[in-house]
């Protein structure tokens, strides 16, 4: 196209001018700086569109990229490959309460990816672009999607800036050297992309925790602060007393976030020097005689990770006290309280309004130290009203405490909670239970949904729990759920049409469970 191409008074090469004229109106544009008829504007825009789509000026071809590394993992069975294509296409049964009885395939994709990765499959080459697009749109999919995509997915991401996240992510995948190959590990650690180095450190840590820490120490001083933080966080896996000297040195890091993470990791080691220092401080503040919160945050406390300035609305003394108690080893309290166990200590009265601060700090300590005995004590009975919980009434904190319990005990506690209190407060608790839900938990959830239907409420009041049930119930529950798919009679006083909506919701639940069973079979 000629550089000065004009169509009916419109300069076809002036794309911004054409857009402005379309927005302001051709009459106003003509009053300003020339222009022609509305039809001419459209013709000029069409001409410029073709010109823009033509794309590139002739130029020498760029070098062809090196071929992607071979992926040694087995290919997906044909049925599973087709299923992945359907899941990535995101076909659903509609939206909202009236979305029909078909499963929502987009919500099943995370489970499909987890199963495919557990069975060691590679992603089909033809579906890699769609898989990377899905991971770009949903951050929750990225670790599993990039693991399935493997080395070829990372190779492809280098060719498209839209997938650059794959090069920054610490997701796993193939293409890493064997952790026992010290020379190859050292070379990739020195030369690899950030994502490769994060994955490499995790791989070596799982193989030899000490070797991973030593590898990190070789470049620690030269790493960026944000990278040091990510690498330090990888030491959570396999954390042991052998990591203490390195973490103690990290307490003097120039980055506040790195210092805080190092202090948190050290406080999770009950025999560490930091834990002992924190215990000494905490025991001086809390005991059978009462609570005496610290009056200042000294240099030693700050070096050990205590944040001096509290958040808005929080008093300084309670803020400092909570951090000290949270970082102290939980075993230190037995001797302080005359040999009492966790449940007995938690049940003791705490005067002067400090009970909430101390109990909340004990909850955080139990979560950090993954102490099952203290978690049980702070959770209390699942049948008790949440507001009367011995340690905390917060459902978010209760969910974290539950994660310290063995899987079967966790599911049993939540099942009793649902049976006693229904589903209105159970969503966060259900989210920490292993999938598929254990039979007692699955039965408790289905029974609570049935009770809610009989009470005349609408199913969308429980849409979150219903969505969890579709993804987390054991597929074998589909047989028992069949009885709930029949249209019930609607007694007087119930919400109009609620029975029909419940029937549709249960039908969708059954169809989703059956599809999940089929998906597992396809991945066999």
Image: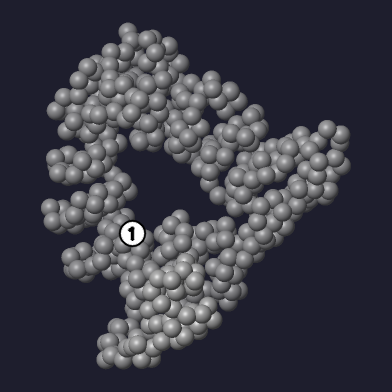
In the rendered structure, the answer to whether residue 240 lies left or right of residue 166 reads: left
Q: Tell which of 71 and 108 is nearer to you.
A: 108
Percent position (x, y) of residue 374? 42, 27
Work out whether residue 490 can be spotted. Answer: yes
Q: Which residue is drawn at 22% across and 44% down?
A: 258
For disc 1, the marked residue is 170
Q: Which of 486 and 276 is in front in this view?
A: 486
Which colour assignment does the render follow?
one colour
Query: Which residue extends farthest top?
Result: 289
| Residue 27, above or below 286 | below
Count of marks overlaid on the render: 1
Residue 258 to residue 491: above or below: below
Q: Is residue 46 above or below residue 392?
A: below
The local secondary structure at tag 1 comes to loop
Task: Return the residue nearer the eye: 166 or 483.
Answer: 166
Q: Residue 274 in the image: x percent, y percent?
A: 21, 32
Q: Residue at x 80, y 44 (%)?
A: 497
Identify the residue shown where x is 45% and y is 20%: 343
**How packed is label 1: few (under 14 Cα within 10 Å), some, or many (20 or more)?**
many
Q: Where is residue 56 in the image (x, y as percent from the top left)?
A: 35, 86
> Quick one: quadrant of the C terminus?
bottom right
> Residue 357 at x, y = what percent?
37, 21
- Frontmost residue, 472 versus 237: 472
Please report the residue visible at 53 percent of the width from the left and 20 percent of the height from the top.
388
Residue 12 visible in the current orientation: no
């Amino acid at each position: 196209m000629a550089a000065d191409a004009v169509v009916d008074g419109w300069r076809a090469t002036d794309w911004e001018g054409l857009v402005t004229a379309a927005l302001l109106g051709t009459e106003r544009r003509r009053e300003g700086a020339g222009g022609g008829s509305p039809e001419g504007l459209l013709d000029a825009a069409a001409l410029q569109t073709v010109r823009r789509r033509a794309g590139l000026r002739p130029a020498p071809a760029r070098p062809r990229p090196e071929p992607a590394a071979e992926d040694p993992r087995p290919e997906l069975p044909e049925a599973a490959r087709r299923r992945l294509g359907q899941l990535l296409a995101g076909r659903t049964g509609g939206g909202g309460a009236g979305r029909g009885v078909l499963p929502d395939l987009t919500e099943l994709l995370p489970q499909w990816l987890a199963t495919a990765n557990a069975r060691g499959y590679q992603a089909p080459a033809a579906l890699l672009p769609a898989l990377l697009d899905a991971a770009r749109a949903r951050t929750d999919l990225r670790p599993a999607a990039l693991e399935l995509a493997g080395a070829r997915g990372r190779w492809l991401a280098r060719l498209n800036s839209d997938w650059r996240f794959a090069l920054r992510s610490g997701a796993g995948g193939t293409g890493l050297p064997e952790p026992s190959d010290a020379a190859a590990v050292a070379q990739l650690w020195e030369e690899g992309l950030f994502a490769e180095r994060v994955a490499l450190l995790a791989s070596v840590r799982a193989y030899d925790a000490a070797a991973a820490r030593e590898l990190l120490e070789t470049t620690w001083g030269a790493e960026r602060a944000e990278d040091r933080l990510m690498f330090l966080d990888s030491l959570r896996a396999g954390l042991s007393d052998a990591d203490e000297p390195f973490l103690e040195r990290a307490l003097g890091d120039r980055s506040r976030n790195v210092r805080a993470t190092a202090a948190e990791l050290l406080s999770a080691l009950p025999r560490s020097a930091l834990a002992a220092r924190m215990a000494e401080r905490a025991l001086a503040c809390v005991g059978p005689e009462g609570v005496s919160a610290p009056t200042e945050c000294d240099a030693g406390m700050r070096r050990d990770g205590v944040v001096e300035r509290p958040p808005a609305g929080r008093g300084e003394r309670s803020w400092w006290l909570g951090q000290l108690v949270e970082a102290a080893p939980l075993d230190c309290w037995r001797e302080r309280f005359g040999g009492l166990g966790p449940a007995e200590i938690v049940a003791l009265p705490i005067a002067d309004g400090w009970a909430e601060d101390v109990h909340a700090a004990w909850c955080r300590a139990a979560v950090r130290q993954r102490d099952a005995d203290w978690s049980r004590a702070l959770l209390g009975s699942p049948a008790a009203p949440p507001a009367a919980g011995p340690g905390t009434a917060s459902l978010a904190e209760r969910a974290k405490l539950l994660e310290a319990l063995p899987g079967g005990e966790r599911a049993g506690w939540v099942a009793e909670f649902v049976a006693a209190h229904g589903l209105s407060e159970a969503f966060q608790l259900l989210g920490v239970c292993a999938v598929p839900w254990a039979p007692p938990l699955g039965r408790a959830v289905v029974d609570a949904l049935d009770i809610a239907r009989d009470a005349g409420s609408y199913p969308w009041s429980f849409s979150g729990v219903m969505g969890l049930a579709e993804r987390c119930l054991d597929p074998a529950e589909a047989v028992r759920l069949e009885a709930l798919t029949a249209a019930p009679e609607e007694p007087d006083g119930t919400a109009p049409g609620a029975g029909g909506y419940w029937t549709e919701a249960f039908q969708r639940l059954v169809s989703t469970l059956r599809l999940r069973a089929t998906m597992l079979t396809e991945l066999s």
